[in-house]
């Protein structure tokens, strides 16, 4: 028996219309099994271990723990958070980056990431979606003032605020996902008036996301973000200028001691392009981004590549959403002007969100890169921040790279312009 359109859409959207891409239960504060006490102990001391240059020794001396005691999905997610922070702290937590991860990280992390269908690096999911703690169980998580992070590279309020702003945006985005579902139902029913009303509400919701994003300036100083936090968010892909020309070798401790070429990985770092919510907004409005990173036309865009850095269920939801996305085509074929106006209003609000992000990147990265950190340079430290500042000083012709490995500003502007061009 065939399902009705409403039933199909309800099945597709399932929990996403209620909780968005945030987990179905609050992230674990810590792993309760005593077997993983060492992981939690090091994670709780991470900022101090990084600042005192002890993090690599600590991890080198850490036993290789198995994943057999991880029983529930929240436990797997918490383990993923810990390993992501450990990996990036180990790689970037010294004067020069390390291009080899020890078995104490590599072996469990590869198993954890395989279980969660993620690459073995710090991702948006591990940094934000699974790493927040509300001030109390009943707190409104759409307000970043009510949120904290469990694990941190720097221990600063600036880092925490950077992460929880994204969590609040994700929480506010939940109502947009339910509006997407209802809009698809309206298209199926050929109900133009309902679709018009839903798109107006969608535009209002996008405006709310932008207002939340702009709260970033309240507690996140550009110098702290650029020089202290951003280097740890960098991946191992396209990072030759920052000291990782070949990526990172994941040593799993094979007894034969033979280096395996497949264990050399080049992975993007944590990036908001890995937000399933942000990609869902584009998909719903029928906005398609082309390749913008120098690849051949017709190849996967950077945004499409970032789906590989999303949890498997989120990735599959976006694929299903893409296959069903028909709102823009319906509106293009409609002779009714109010529905076109409502759609264009939503596109304008999404463009405003992209504009706000570009302004933020300009302040937190472009302008901050022009103010070198004398302490870091005196130490001879090599990372994404010092490499960018040094190239600015020497006049080297290079483009600022994002933590995901893109040419940052051209990518963001092209993405913004693609949104603008979608208007009917």
Image: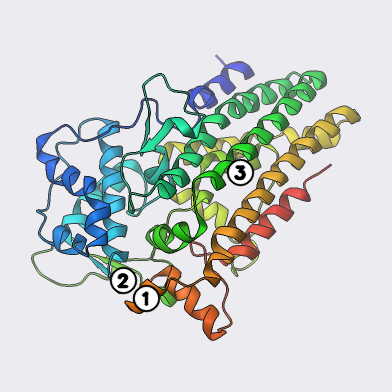
Q: Mark 1 sits on what residue? A: 243
136 to 159, vertically: above or below: above
Mark with earlier residue (2, 3):
2
| Circle 2/circle 1 CB separation < 8 Å | yes
Q: Residue drawn at (48%, 24%), measured in percent from left and top?
A: 140
Tell me if mark 1 has few (under 14), some (14-19) or many (20+) residues whose alpha carbon lies within 10 angstroms of its own: some
From the viewer's perspective, tell me whether residue 61 is left or right of residue 219. Answer: left
Q: Is residue 233 left or right of residue 414?
A: left
Residue 135: % across, % down: 38, 28
The residue tagged with tag 3: helix, strand or loop?
A: helix
Depth check: 11 or 30 in front?
30
Look at 9% across and 53% down and name the residue there.
63
The N terminus - image quarter: top right
Give the percent coordinates (x, y) of residue 300.
Answer: 57, 58
Based on the displayed image, in which of its 4 quarters is residue 59 positioned?
A: bottom left
Alpha carbon separation for disc pair 2 and 1: 6 Å
Write down the residue under mark 2.
97
Percent coordinates x, y for residue 264 in the rendering: 30, 68
> Nearer the N terminus, badge 3 or badge 1?
3
The correct choice, above or below, for 85 with respect to 398 in the image is above
Q: Is residue 292 left or right of residue 342?
A: left
Read off the residue under disc 3: 214
Give how far apart the Cα atoms at labels 2 and 3 are.
33 Å
Which corner quadrant of the image does residue 211 belong to?
Answer: top right
């Amino acid at each position: 028996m065939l399902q009705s359109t409403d039933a199909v859409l309800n099945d597709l959207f399932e929990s996403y219309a209620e909780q968005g891409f945030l987990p179905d239960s609050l992230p674990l504060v810590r792993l309760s099994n005593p077997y993983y006490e060492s992981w939690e102990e090091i994670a709780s001391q991470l900022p101090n271990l990084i600042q005192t240059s002890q993090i690599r020794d600590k991890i080198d001396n850490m036993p290789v723990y198995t994943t057999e005691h991880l029983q529930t999905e929240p436990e797997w997610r918490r383990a993923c958070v810990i390993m992501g922070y450990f990996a990036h702290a180990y790689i970037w937590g010294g004067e020069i980056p390390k291009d080899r991860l020890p078995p104490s990280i590599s072996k469990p992390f590869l198993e954890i990431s395989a279980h969660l269908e993620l690459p073995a690096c710090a991702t948006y999911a591990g940094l934000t979606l699974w790493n927040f703690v509300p001030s109390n169980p009943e707190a409104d998580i759409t307000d970043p003032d009510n949120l904290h992070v469990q694990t941190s590279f720097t221990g600063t309020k600036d880092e925490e605020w950077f992460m929880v702003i994204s969590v609040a945006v994700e929480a506010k985005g939940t109502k947009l996902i339910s509006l997407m579902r209802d809009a698809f139902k309206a298209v199926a029913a050929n109900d133009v008036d309902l679709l018009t009303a839903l798109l107006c509400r969608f535009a209002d919701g996008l405006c709310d996301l932008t207002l939340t994003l702009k709260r970033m300036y309240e507690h996140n100083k550009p110098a702290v973000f650029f020089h202290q936090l951003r280097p740890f968010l960098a991946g191992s892909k396209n990072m030759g200028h920052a000291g990782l020309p070949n990526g990172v070798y994941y040593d799993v401790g094979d007894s034969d001691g033979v280096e395996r070429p497949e264990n050399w990985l080049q992975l993007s770092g944590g990036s908001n392009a890995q937000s399933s919510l942000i990609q869902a907004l584009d998909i719903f409005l029928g906005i398609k981004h082309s390749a913008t990173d120098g690849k051949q036309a017709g190849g996967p865009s950077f945004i499409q590549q970032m789906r590989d850095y999303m949890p498997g269920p989120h990735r599959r939801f976006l694929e299903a959403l893409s296959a069903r996305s028909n709102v823009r085509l319906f509106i293009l074929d409609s002779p009714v002007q109010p529905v076109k106006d409502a759609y264009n209003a939503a596109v304008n609000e999404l463009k405003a969100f992209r504009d706000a992000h570009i302004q933020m990147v300009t302040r937190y990265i472009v302008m901050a890169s022009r103010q070198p950190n004398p302490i870091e340079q005196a130490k001879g430290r090599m990372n994404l921040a010092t490499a960018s500042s040094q190239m600015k000083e020497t006049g080297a012709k290079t483009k600022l790279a994002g933590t995901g490995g893109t040419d940052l500003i051209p990518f963001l502007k092209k993405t913004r312009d693609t949104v603008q061009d979608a208007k009917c």
